[in-house]
Image (spheres, helix red, strand yellow):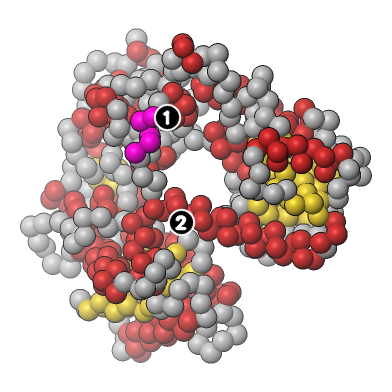
Amino acid sequence: MLTGRVPAAEGDRPVFLDARGLIGCRHRLGLDATYPEQLADVREDTGVQQRRAAAQAHRDRVRDTLVAADPDSWVIIDPAQSARARAAATLRACAAGAARIWGGLLPQEPDTGRRGGAEILLRDESGGYIPVIVVNHKVTDPRKPEPAEFHPLTSDLLHWHPEPDRARKLRQQPRDQQRLAHVYRMLQRNGLAPATPAGGVIGFHFDRILVHDLTAVLTDYDTRYADRIAVVRGEVATVPSKVPECRQCPWWTRGTAGGCQGWLNEHRDVSVVAPGSRADVLRGHGVRTIDELASWMGPEPEDWQHGPFEEAVVTARAWLVDAPLVRRFERVWVRRADVEVDVDLESYQEEGAYLWGTLLDGVYRPFVTWDPLPTEDEGRSFVEFWTWLMGVRDQAVAAGKTFAAYCYSRSAEDKWLYESARRFAGRPGIPTEAQITKFVDSVQWVDMFQAVTDQFICPSGKGLKKIAPVAGFAWRDPEAGGEASMSWYRRAVGYDGAPDLTQRTRLFEYNEDDVRATAVLREWMNPRDPVEHCAEREVPTLGDFAQAPGTPSPAQT
């Protein structure tokens, strides 16, 4: 296995770390720094490329809008210059008292290893500069005012004036705060820090600046930075541990012994069944392997905050016998109705939802726009979908029948139902947000993901691509997945050339398979008629894993 340790011959070379390395996998950070040559032939994921391009387009739009509003107050740092020249230009602009600087870069620090900058530096009353970063993700959500709740600070885009914002609720984005703390420390180094530790974020909606007080963040940042720079310098060795990032990491299958995946499976590492922070808690109690977790017989750890600990133990036991699912109860149930519609949408980043796919009585019906997003035609396709769905529901109710619409992991569908209602509000056929709420909060809107979560323990994951095959379903396209569909969509609408109609067919088939998978899963969980192929016959229960294999873990001995 490759280890994240810099060869001794390279140890004297200065290494640098920007804020991107503060969040994510430590082992990947070490491998990237140690073996950069092994990544030379790695083709960057198409989805990552698209998100990077979208982020740059967003930054350009923010820059052009803000500079146009008050061009005389801005100094623009030329991004075509070298890093050294950009840093020098930034320091000159600060020394000259520039009110606003776009594209500021601070001098690299060979001793600390820091490098970085911010899209915007705003001069405050003390003569220091407040860092403001521009990101292409949401940093707040709208909400009705709640006097008793915490209200985030926001500021006008053109005048720095933080005040509590009762119309918004905060989205936790630790990466943003870490980046602001990183830039703040670099401003301190150059005598340019603002009077109070603060920074701002302009998010996807580009309507306000979210203001962060960095006072409490800096302590965590300093600890995190000291650890991460030590990893990059090879002063600390790292080993793999499964985290969500693994799904798109080039080191997952790269290197000796099958990469990180091979190493984790060979060592039966506990993070395989308890990824992320759960594994950290278990290691703190001496549990490092799946076998040790499966053998746990004592009370649960006092610092366990990840759901019932018994389920973590059962997950380990199920993994050892290759059981993809474990039933929590003797009977498996999901709400059934006389009239059932399956729903799945396809969206492109934050630009919109271009396809609402449905399945009724075995017939697939898509509601789609092939005008490149963002487009007004999205509103037309959404109205057609919503009108059809509500029509099916109303006809069922009028006939004295029950109705239910099913999706898998409703967060995406709910998001774009509300987003569509807001974006196209007031147009003929567009539902109000209140109408959306009434529907999604009713028993007629059923989330199959929640039904799976409530009734199964899933050692290999709870995604539809993991669960539906257990019920006997298979996708036609071996590359089917959310990231792949982003690339298919770009080609389908002609973002990068002439529209490719074959990719439209591919997207229809992918979407159709998703709704059919949901229908198959529902019938498998709660069949209308007794059948041989069903969950209660094929999936073991918690009781089947009541006895621990092997010997007690080190934590109990």
Q: Distance between the residues labelled 2 and 1?
A: 23 Å
Residue, disc 2: 50
Characterize the local packing of mark 2: few (<14), some (14-19) or many (20 or more) Cα atoms within 10 angstroms: some
Q: Looking at the rendering, in which quadrant would you find the C terminus?
A: top left
Specify the amino acid type for callout 2: Gln
**Labelled disc at residue 148:** none
For the N terminus, the quadrant is: top left
Q: What element carries label 1?
A: helix
Q: Where is residue 199 in the image (x, y as percent from the top left)?
A: 74, 44
Does the image show residue 377?
yes
Q: Where is residue 36 in the image (x, y as percent from the top left)?
A: 42, 29
Q: Going 29% across and 16% down the picture, which residue do you hit?
A: 552
* Residue at the disc numbered 1: 36
Residue 444 in view in this figure: no
> Viewer-proximal residue, 452 or 103?
103
Q: Along the polypeptide, which appears first: circle 2 or circle 1?
A: 1
Q: Magenta part of the protein: which range? A: 36-41
Farthest residue to the right: give it: 125
